[in-house]
Amino acid sequence: MAQAGPSMALRGLRVLDLTRVRAGPTCVRIFADFGADVIKVESPPGFDPNENMSGPRLGYDMQNLHRNKRSLAINLKTAEGKAILMRLVEEADLLVENFRPDVKERLGLDFETLHAINPRLILVSISGFGQSGPYRTRAGFDQIAQGMGGMMSVTGLPGQGPVRAGIALADSSAGLYGAVGALVALQERALSGKGQWVQTSLLEAQIAMMDFQAARYLVEGSVPPQAGNDHPYSTPMGVYKTRDGAINLGVGGEEQWRSFCRAVERPEWGSDPRFDSMEKRFDQRPELRRMIEERLSAAGSSHWLAAMEAHGVPAGPIYAVDQMFDDPQVRHLGIARPLEHPQLGEIRVVGQPVTLSRTPSTVATPTPAAGEHNDEVLAELGYDEAGLARLRAEGVI
């Protein structure tokens, strides 16, 4: 299989990646997929007791998160290992890290120290709870942020108790917000010539992802409850049973409601005074659900999805992951990206969900072995064969 070449969108940018687990790698992956030179700075194998926090190197998670990077494995506990990192800092555009704030300061990777070495450097820090405040030194994980950020209180069926989302929502969104902040800082640097410190956290990102549910409380003082598969304030919008399964319906305004009634061959519902406004339909939600599911039980999901499409009513199937990737629209979008791995063979990973017309993202190289690019990166810093041999003998690499 021919391997794609790197994207040209961010060529010329150098990113130092000192991240692990998910939030930080999600941020850096965006830069790697759009062509930045990303150097994953990590410990040599066996030096870090937490090196497998994201699972095995050849596992699906590491392969999906760390493609398109070069790996430099150095021992930062040695003076020369630290010096190598600082030499890289001198020429880097971004350094992305997700240490606890106190750990970053202990390692000498705080913004003031790095900015003194390279005033143009943009430091992106992703933490659990923020760089300051009473929780700054707490270790943060996705589920903890989901709970504290309100997500688990609105997820799940009414009355069943808190439920986590089935994905690492806080981690992934913190990574995305970190990348957005970095891109803003890069544009500002083009004007000012100065780097700055970009900060986000799992807690802040999760609260931001609450969006209208959070605004509901801030503006109206209303605490949103669990609504299960139903939309919090619009109906019929949610999961509805059919004869052979279930489908998602998304009926919004009045014209969509009347179109839905025609799609299920019950046009009289459209003028029924019990249901002739969104507010009335919401108040009558249990009875309306009973009527709709009784009607949908007359045919299977594929029949009703076709009927909804014919009448312009938003609706869709509910897929397992294998069905999702087999959908013709998903195949057309090409978000499952092929990749040739020297040990795993041909695999697929999840591509970027945004397309640029001239400089699209690419998945060019697989996740490197730890230290795979030591000689290459260190040669760029001026180390010759004798110097590399010395670093190995002294346990620096």
Image: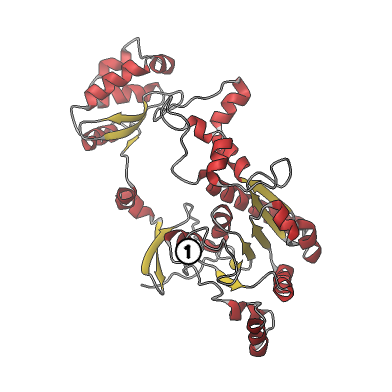
Q: Where is residue 256 in the image (x, y as percent from the top left)?
A: 36, 26
Q: Where is residue 183 in the image (x, y as percent from the top left)?
A: 64, 54
The three-letter code of the residue at mark 1 reads Thr
**Left-right relation of 41 to 87:** left
Q: Which of 172 and 147 is in front in this view?
A: 147
Q: Which residue corresponds to the image point at 73% horizontal and 41% vertical from the top-left? A: 133
Q: Which residue corresponds to the image point at 65% horizontal and 55% vertical from the top-left? A: 99
Figure quadrant of the C terminus: bottom right
Residue beneath label 1, please?
A: 362
In which image quadrant can residue 339 be found? Answer: bottom left
At label 1, counting other C-alpha atoms closer than 10 Å, the crowd grade (few under 14, some 14-19, many 20 or more) is many
Q: Residue furthest top?
A: 273
**Left-right relation of 336 to 117:** left
Please say if 244 is above or below 159: below
Please say if 351 is above or below 215: below
Q: Which residue corresponds to the image point at 39% horizontal and 73% vertical from the top-left? A: 2
* Residue 359 appearing in the image: no
In which image quadrant can residue 272 be found? Answer: top left
Q: Position of residue 190 (x, y in %)?
A: 72, 58
